[in-house]
Image (cartoon, helix red, strand yellow):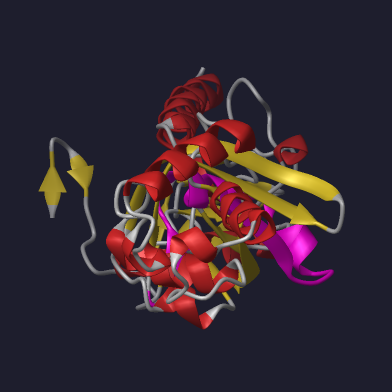
Amino acid sequence: MKENGVQVHLNTPVKELLMEDGRICGVELENGQKEYADAVILACGGLSYPQTGSDGDGHRMAGEVGHSCTRLLPSLVPLLVQEDWCHELQGLSLKNVTLTLRQGKKQIYQEFGEMMFTHFGITGPIVLSASTCVHKYLKKGNLQAEIDLKPALTEKQLDERVLRDFAEVPNRQLRNTLDKLLPKSLILPLIQVSGNDPYAVVHDMTKQSRLALIRTVKALPLTVTGTRGFAEAIITQGGIPVKEVMPDTMESKIVRGLFLAGEMLDLDAVTGGYNLQIAWSTGRAAGIGAAEYVKTLNE
């Protein structure tokens, strides 16, 4: 169909790019039909949101005319966690917490904000942003995560608060004394992770046991084993290296008449609208660049 003078093909996959004398001259559709053009813009997305048709075909077609492609990985995606107690907290949201990721002694990520437990691990804004930097480390092994549930308090301040809470209910079991401090569903798992007995009476707790509880509140440990797949990823990490395109026009340096935009390129960022801006900016540059390229051909 035609709309505003533009021929639109619905539900019609492109099979390959057409070339002539080292230049792009159009595309061949899956049904064998050929559409000729002076310039082609590849804006096919990556592998995320597969329901929209993003299946990697754009990278395949670019590769067939000489482009390279870095490894495609799911990004801005939830993380998988090993601990069973974490899975049992499905749906619990945490606000104003700090998430830290380490591999060995090396800290690779830290951010303050919101997150949520799921049946497979953790998700939420600070977790999705963390996923942008984990893949190269996960190749070497699992990551150690820590959640600081009370980042506004030092261990000393937190200990003083817990002592005040304990003083109000000295004969109560530990599992029934932390309601003012923690979400109810998190209390029992946290006590168990700290090595304490949930049924211990608080006035019988030693200082060592209490400090173990405090340290767990400040650094609740998790083991990150991987990420979810492309079906749940907001963006695709990897793609055609930016060194293979002209930065001002998005035209390929490999073949004339081919322009690349959006997640076709090896560009990605954390949450906050940056990835949308990458798509808009490169798309605009590619559109203007293609128009100028065609204009010079016809002069």
Q: Report if residue 225 lies within the magenta region.
A: no
Residue furthest to the bottom: 84
Left or right, residue 211 beside residue 30: right
Task: Please say whether residue 227 is visible from this viewpoint.
Answer: no
How many tags in the picture? 0
**x, y percentage for residue 109?**
68, 43
Q: Splitting the image into 4 quarters, where does residue 29 fall?
A: bottom left
**x, y percentage for residue 252?**
66, 39
Q: In this view, does 141 lie above or below 216?
A: below
Task: Please say whether residue 272 is visible from this viewpoint.
Answer: yes
Which range is magenta?
Answer: 119-147
Q: Is residue 198 above or below residue 155?
A: below
Residue furthest to the top: 299
Q: Could you say which is closer to the camera, residue 160 or residue 42?
A: 160
**x, y percentage for residue 181?**
37, 47
Residue at 42% x, 65% y is 174
Left or right, residue 144 beside residue 216: right
Residue at 63% x, 68% y is 224
Left or right, residue 187 beside residue 51: right
Q: Could you say which is closer to the camera, residue 259 or residue 211?
A: 211
Q: Report if residue 125 lies within the magenta region.
A: yes
Q: Could you say which is closer to the camera, residue 264 or residue 108?
A: 108
Q: In this view, does 68 lie above or below 28?
A: above
Residue at 58% x, 24% y is 249
Residue at 48% x, 59% y is 203
The quadrant in which the N terminus is found is bottom left
**x, y percentage for residue 100?**
64, 47
